[in-house]
Image (tube, rainbow, N blue to C red):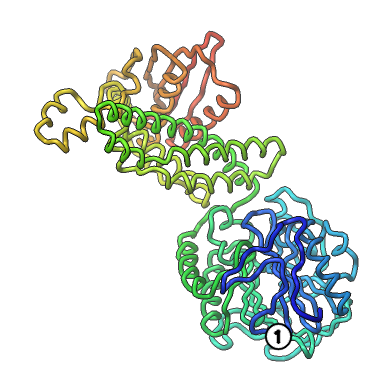
């Protein structure tokens, strides 16, 4: 295109271009590509999501190059209108260059008529990614993960191929169906201390060179693209994130090597800005800070579980199940803290009451839980993709972890509730990242455990004698008073009968998980209004059985009951036992737990 850079209105994605700082690009406007004489850039920069990537359109006197058309037809159509204008001003060969062959970066090609026309563009993809596209590999392209269909695609220009790597430094001329004559020169890893396989591509005599660096890790075919002062990095800096690390084609070893290589590249080259596949461009100074952090995270991901469609579905289900419990736990914590504040106000201690209000961000918690509930409802209504729900839960839970002050809260309200909330949130993030939460299965005396648990849930943690004995110490008395107001034994108004084993009964379980399981079951029965609860313990040669039963006048809704049942069964399994539930017609509910006995 001749003349001064001009903007192109967004009718589908944004009403206005993104604002730019001194070190930022302006989205949806033509601008000079810094350090690349004769080249201009039209970036389309999106907020970060899993649906589509950023797109970057480059024009030189000899070619038009679209980096990542994205995952939305509207986005590709918008870009194609700009391409049409460019070619109307000056006809040039058109190339589509993928940073990697994941569907959020390319699937719009298959759904955009202007791009689907044979010969309209030559597709440039790293050699392994090209092979994936040509065989329509739903696993490697993540189409299976997002429940999207793809059709095989021909990549006319394979990048960083084994054949060219065998002849480093030798320019190769390639002629394409769009009329382009392109010169490609491969350079081996280690050249100029940059330990990445790379190629230099020249589209014509008046165009600046474009360098391609093979940076596997996020995917086998990931590349970074260098022109002028810009480095287009695809999803390199997201590759260690939960829900991304472990996807099919991901490699910890390759990722760490690629991060090291890009770090060296930033030191060697005149690069001012990194253009990611999602979100805003990153100034090089910030990138120098981010790279070691991403590498540190990647180094912790040895033996991570593969993030397959089946695993995404399991995590999404687990997310919904624990959110039901998280909602209840936060409701209890907020309610108890509110009651403590109310009593303090009545005692004209409003200053202390205000301080307590800072321990938990109730409004933020409500907004986050409501946002997840709405997202979940829409997900089921539209039969959404499991990975989206799992990612949304990870986002919400990460924020929930910052909404309450654990240590301070545990000094005022029941520390067991605070600990269980903290553990639920941490366990989800651990599972989401691809790991198994730490467990310690040991030999435990079941009779003693149940006796201590029931006693702890029946007797107030702060006695009147303890309060009186601390009266001379104003600070200690105030702390005990707050705790006595903020804690209320779960079973204090419930008749509990325990038929315990007469002798020590040893089983192999995770004590913490098993204690949590029993507490959740007792909370469920008390919360549903059971006036009396019976706990019976018996044993056989191989196992021990605990039956917990009560009557619940108010049955749970079907969906809530299903989530609670799944959650309890999963927790029991992680504790090293098994759980069955019987909801009788007479409103009697019985939970039966079986654990392996040690004789």
177 w.r.t. 380: above or below: below
In the figure, residue 203 lies in which quadrant? bottom right
- Would you say residue 118 is visible in this rendering? yes
Residue 10 on image: x %, y %: 75, 60
Name the residue nearer the viewer: 84 or 560.
84
Which residue is at 71% across, 62% downward? 105
Q: Residue furthest top?
A: 586
Residue 87 on image: x %, y %: 86, 75
Q: Residue furthest left?
A: 472
Residue 580 on image: x %, y %: 51, 24
530 w.r.t. 67: above or below: above
Name the residue nearer the viewer: 265 or 542.
265
Q: Which residue is mark 1?
A: 209
182 w.r.t. 100: above or below: below
Which residue is at 35% across, 38% downward? 357
Answer few, some or many: residues within 10 Å of disc 1's Cα (few below 14, many 20 plus, some between 14 and 19): some
Quarter of the figure with the C terminus: top left
Name the residue nearer the viewer: 514 or 93.
93
Find numbered disc 1 in the image and state the secondary structure of the residue it sits on. loop
- Would you say residue 510 is visible in this rendering? no
In the figure, residue 174 lies in which quadrant? bottom right
Quarter of the figure with the N terminus: bottom right
Residue 220 as seen in the image, left or right of residue 507: right
Residue 524 on image: x %, y %: 45, 23
In the figure, residue 192 lies in which quadrant? bottom right
Which residue is at 35% across, 32% downward? 337
Name the residue nearer the viewer: 594 or 91.
91
Total marks in image? 1
Residue 1 as seen in the image, left or right of residue 358: right
């Amino acid at each position: 295109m001749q003349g001064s850079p001009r903007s192109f209105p967004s009718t589908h994605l944004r009403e206005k271009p993104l604002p730019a700082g001194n070190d930022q690009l302006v989205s949806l406007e033509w601008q000079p590509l810094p350090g690349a004489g004769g080249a201009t850039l039209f970036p389309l920069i999106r907020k970060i999501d899993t649906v589509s990537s950023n797109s970057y359109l480059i024009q030189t006197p000899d070619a038009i190059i679209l980096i990542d058309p994205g995952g939305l037809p509207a986005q590709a159509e918008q870009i194609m209108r700009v391409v049409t204008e460019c070619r109307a001003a000056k006809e040039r060969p058109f190339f589509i260059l993928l940073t990697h062959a994941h569907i959020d970066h390319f699937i719009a090609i298959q759904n955009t008529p202007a791009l689907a026309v044979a010969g309209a563009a030559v597709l440039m993809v790293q050699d392994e990614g090209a092979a994936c596209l040509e065989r329509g590999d739903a696993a490697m392209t993540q189409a299976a993960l997002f429940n999207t269909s793809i059709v095989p695609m021909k990549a006319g220009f394979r990048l960083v191929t084994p054949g060219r790597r065998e002849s480093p430094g030798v320019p190769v001329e390639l002629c394409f169906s769009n009329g382009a004559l392109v010169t490609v020169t491969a350079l081996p890893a280690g050249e100029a201390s940059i330990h990445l396989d790379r190629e230099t591509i020249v589209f014509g005599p008046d165009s600046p060179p474009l360098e391609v660096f093979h940076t596997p890790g996020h995917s086998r075919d990931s590349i970074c693209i260098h022109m002028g002062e810009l480095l287009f990095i695809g999803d390199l800096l997201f590759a260690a994130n939960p829900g991304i690390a472990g996807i099919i084609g991901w490699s910890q070893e390759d990722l760490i090597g690629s991060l090291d290589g890009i770090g060296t590249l930033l030191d060697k080259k005149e690069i001012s800005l990194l253009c990611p596949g999602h979100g805003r461009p990153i100034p090089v100074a910030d990138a120098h800070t981010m790279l070691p952090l991403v590498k540190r995270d990647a180094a912790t991901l040895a033996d991570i579980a593969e993030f397959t469609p089946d695993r995404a579905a399991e995590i999404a289900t687990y997310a919904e199940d624990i959110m039901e419990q998280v909602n209840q736990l936060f409701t209890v914590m907020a309610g108890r803290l509110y009651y403590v504040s109310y009593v303090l106000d009545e005692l004209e201690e409003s200053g202390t009451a205000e301080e307590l209000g800072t321990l938990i961000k109730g409004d933020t918690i409500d907004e986050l839980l409501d946002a997840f509930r709405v997202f979940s409802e829409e997900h089921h209504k539209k039969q959404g993709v499991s990975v989206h729900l799992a990612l949304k839960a990870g986002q919400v839970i990460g924020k929930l972890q910052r909404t309450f002050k654990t240590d301070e809260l545990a000094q005022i309200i029941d520390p067991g509730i605070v600990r269980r909330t903290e553990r639920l949130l941490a366990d989800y993030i651990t599972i989401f990242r691809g790991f198994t939460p730490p467990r310690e299965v040991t030999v435990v005396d079941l009779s003693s455990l149940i006796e201590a648990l029931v006693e702890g849930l029946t007797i107030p943690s702060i006695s009147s004698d303890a309060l009186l004995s601390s009266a001379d110490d104003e600070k200690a008395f105030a702390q005990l008073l707050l705790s006595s107001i903020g804690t209320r034994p779960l079973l204090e108004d419930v008749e509990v009968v325990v038929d315990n084993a007469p002798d020590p009964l040893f089983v192999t379980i995770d004590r913490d998980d098993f204690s949590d399981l029993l507490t959740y079951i007792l909370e469920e029965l008390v919360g549903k209004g059971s006036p009396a609860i019976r706990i019976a313990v018996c044993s056989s040669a191989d196992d021990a059985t605990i039956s917990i039963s009560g009557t619940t006048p108010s049955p749970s809704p079907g969906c809530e009951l299903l989530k609670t049942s799944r959650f309890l069964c999963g927790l029991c399994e992680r504790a090293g036992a098994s759980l069955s539930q019987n909801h009788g017609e007479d409103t009697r509910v019985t939970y039966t737990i079986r654990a392996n006995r040690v004789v």
